[in-house]
Image (cartoon, grey):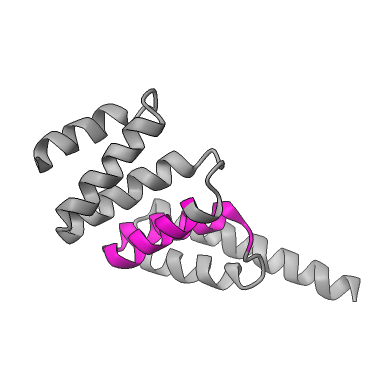
Amino acid sequence: MASSAGNRAARVERALEEAAVLMRHGNCEEAARRYRAVLRFAPQDADLHYNLGAALAGAGKFAEAAKAFDAFVEAHPRSPLASDARFGGALAQAALGDKARAVSGFETFVKQDPQHPLARDAERALAALR
């Protein structure tokens, strides 16, 4: 049984490495498929959920990305990636043309993490959306 668990862990690690390479090479849709496959084995892994949102956004699947980022923030509000997920969710909403949700997302992002390296980008996005 330990061998089976070890094989599964090796397969999961390989899939994560492949997904990261796919993301770096711009094949975000395939990376999202890999992240979804790995999530079946590690559904509580916060980083996987965040990476799935990023891959979906990179693939232009903004509705799915927004849902993934929102679900991430709801499930992991204290994660170091929560601010990034809020920003990603707001960007996805803006890409979908949902101005109200994008504005709300960027406002929340800036309010909760005004020193974040992306705070100025969020403020510029807010100015453009208003």
**Residue drawn at the location 43% of the way across and 39% of the way down:** 83
Q: Position of residue 28 (x, y in %)?
A: 37, 62
**Residue drawn at the location 64% of the way across and 61% of the way down:** 44
State the residue in front, 68 or 8.
68
In the rendered structure, the answer to whether residue 43 lies left or right of residue 98 reads: right
Q: Residue furthest top?
A: 115
Q: Position of residue 30 (x, y in %)?
A: 42, 69
Asked if one can make out residue 123 in the rendered structure from this viewpoint, the answer is: yes
Report the number of numbered marks. Answer: 0
**Residue drawn at the location 27% of the way across and 41% of the way down:** 106
Q: Is residue 18 above or below residue 24?
A: below
In the rendered structure, the answer to whether residue 38 lies left or right of residue 87 reads: right
Q: Quadrant of the C terminus?
A: top left
Secondary structure mostly seen in the magenta stretch:
helix
Residue 59 on the magenta span: yes
Asked if one can make out residue 27 in the rendered structure from this viewpoint, the answer is: no
Q: Position of residue 108 (x, y in %)?
A: 33, 39
In the rendered structure, the answer to whether residue 94 lies left or right of residue 7 reads: left
State the residue in front, 83 or 54.
83
Q: Quadrant of residue 96?
A: bottom left
**Residue drawn at the location 35% of the way across and 67% of the way down:** 64
Q: Position of residue 65 (x, y in %)?
A: 35, 61
Q: Quadrant of the N terminus?
A: bottom right
Q: Residue furthest right?
A: 1
Look at the image and give the residue range highlighted in magenta.
44-73
Q: Is residue 92 above or below residue 125?
A: below
Residue 105 on the magenta span: no
State the residue in front, 115 or 32.
115
